[in-house]
């Protein structure tokens, strides 16, 4: 289920079955053209990944809106903000919280997050519709969903 009016209506009627919160973490860089392009590729990839994961487990996973932050941000401060979000979200019957990111910098802060960090190296290709890229994405989604299922 996603952060949309129609999915929220479904969630409200079945929230006891939706026990997993998925929160995408996405850095935004405005430093130069190259870093902006890299950010945009990560954004596209993130959207594909989390939407596929949500689709596979609709009714079990609730997909939170993407948490955007500047790539130059202090991740200790961002960790505190994320934990505040999780604290509020735990008022609902979520039993599992997963943060999904391509940003390797989160690995240093993983132990301080109130949830499980799912990190993958970012896809560097600019063509998200290329067959090779799609196959890589499918394989990685299968691996991530197996990991999530191991927590259930």
Image (cartoon, helix red, strand yellow):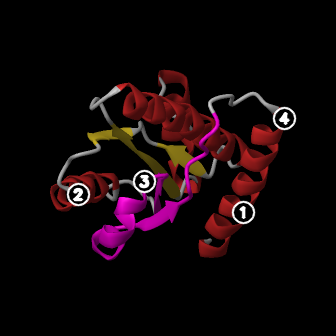
Point out residue 124 in the picture as x, y percentages from the top left corner. 59, 42
- Give the Cα distance between marks 3 and 1: 18 Å
In this picture, is 90 found above or below 45?
A: below
Q: Residues within 10 Å of mark 4 (few under 14, many from 20)?
A: few
Residue at which label 4 appears: 131
The secondary element bearing badge 4 is classed as helix
| Residue shown at the point (27%, 54%) measured from the top left | 82
Q: CA distance from mark 2 to mark 1?
A: 26 Å
Residue 109 falls in image quadrant: bottom left
* Residue at image mark 2: 75
In the rendered structure, which disc, 3 or 2, sits on the residue that comes first in sequence? 2
The first of marks 4 and 2 along the sequence is 2
Q: Are marks 3 and 2 in contact (CB under 8 Å)?
A: no
Q: Which residue is mark 3?
A: 103
Secondary structure, mark 1, is helix
For disc 1, the marked residue is: 143
Is 50 on the left-hand or right-hand side of 149? left
Q: Nearer the viewer, residue 35 or 136?
A: 35
What secondary structure is found at the residue carrying circle 3?
loop
Question: Which stretch appears magenta?
Answer: 96-125
Q: Specify the quadrant that holds the N terminus.
A: top right
């Amino acid at each position: 289920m996603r952060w949309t009016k129609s999915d929220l209506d479904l969630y409200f009627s079945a929230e006891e079955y939706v026990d997993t919160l998925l929160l995408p973490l996405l850095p935004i860089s405005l430093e130069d053209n190259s870093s902006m392009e890299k950010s945009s590729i990560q954004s596209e990839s993130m959207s594909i990944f989390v939407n596929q994961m949500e689709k596979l487990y609709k009714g079990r996973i609730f997909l939170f809106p993407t948490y955007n932050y500047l790539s130059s941000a202090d991740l200790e401060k961002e960790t505190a903000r994320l934990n505040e979000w999780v604290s509020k979200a735990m008022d609902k019957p979520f039993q599992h919280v997963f943060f999904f990111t391509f940003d390797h910098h989160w690995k240093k802060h993983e132990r301080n997050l109130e949830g499980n960090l799912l990190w993958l190296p970012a896809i560097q290709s600019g063509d998200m519709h290329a067959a090779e890229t799609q196959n890589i994405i499918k394989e990685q989604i299968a691996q991530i969903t197996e990991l999530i299922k191991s927590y259930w």
